[in-house]
Image (cartoon, rainbow, N blue to C red):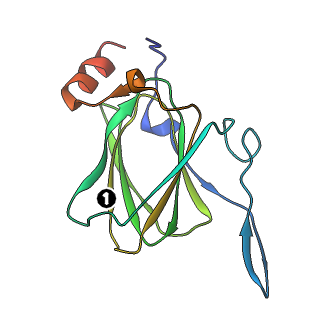
Amino acid sequence: MNKQTYSINNCKLLTLSSIIDSRGSLCVLEGNTVLPFPIQRVYYLYGCSLEHLRGGHAHINLKQVFIALNGTINIKLDDGKNSKDILLDKPNLALYVSPHIWRDIRFLSKDAVLLVLASDLYYEADYIRSYNDFKLFTSSK
C-alpha cells in the first residue's frame, strides 16, 4: 500500500470556467488540464434519500472530483486527524478529493445530482469501507 501522507488540506475546491451567453452556460472539463488527473471513470448519483449518507469509505490510490450538477450536497472529508464539511451547490464548483480521505456524502435537496470523475476504473481492493480500518491505516503512516 502507498503510505504517502495525505490530509484534507490536499483536497481543494476548483472553480470551473464557464462560457456564458444568452443561450445558457457551458463548462468544459478536461483531465490533466482543469482536473489534476486523467479521467478514467464517470458516474453520477441522483434520487438519493435525504436521511441516508452515501460514500462512507476512503480510497487507497483513487483520486476523485465531485460536482453538484443540481441541488445541494454536503461532503464531509476526514483524514483521520481532522475533518471539514464542504458544501457543493453550484455546477461550476468542483471538489478534488485525494486518496486516503474518508468521505461522507449527504444530499441536502431531493433534486440533487452528484457527478463523480475518477482517476481509475472501479477496483474493490482500493476501498477502505470500515472507519476503524481507515483509522488504523492513517495512524500507521
Q: How many marks?
A: 1
Residue 133 vertical placement versus 95 (above, below): above
> Could you tell me residue 135's position as x and y percent?
25, 25
Q: Position of residue 54 (x, y in %)?
A: 31, 51
Identify whether 1 is placed above or below 122.
above
Instruction: Give the residue type that dot 1 points to.
Output: Arg
Foreground residue among 21 and 126? 126
- Say which element carries label 1: strand
**Location of the C terminus (image quadrant):** top left
The vertical placement of 104 against 73, above or below, is above
Report crowding for label 1: few under 14, some 14 to 19, many 20 or more residues within 10 A (C-alpha).
Answer: many
Q: Is residue 131 above or below residue 23?
A: above
- Left or right side of 96 for 83: left
Residue linked to disc 1 = 106
Image quarter for residue 22? bottom right
Position of residue 53 measured from the top left corner of the image (x, y, whole percent):
26, 53
Determine whether, in the image, residue 95 is placed left or right of residue 14. Answer: left
- Would residue 44 appear left or right of 110 to someone viewing this image? right
Residue, x 39% and y 26% (percent of image)?
124
Outermost residue to the bottom: 22
* Displayed quadrant of residue 106: bottom left
Q: Of residues 55 and 76, which is closer to you in this image?
A: 55
**In percent of the image, x 66 and y 38: which residue is there?**
36
| Residue under the image location 74 percent in, 38 percent down | 32
Residue at figure coordinates x 32%, y 69% from the top left: 108
Q: Left or right: 58 with respect to 39?
A: left
Image quarter hosting the N terminus: top left
Query: Percent from the top left, x then y, of residue 25?
Result: 72, 76
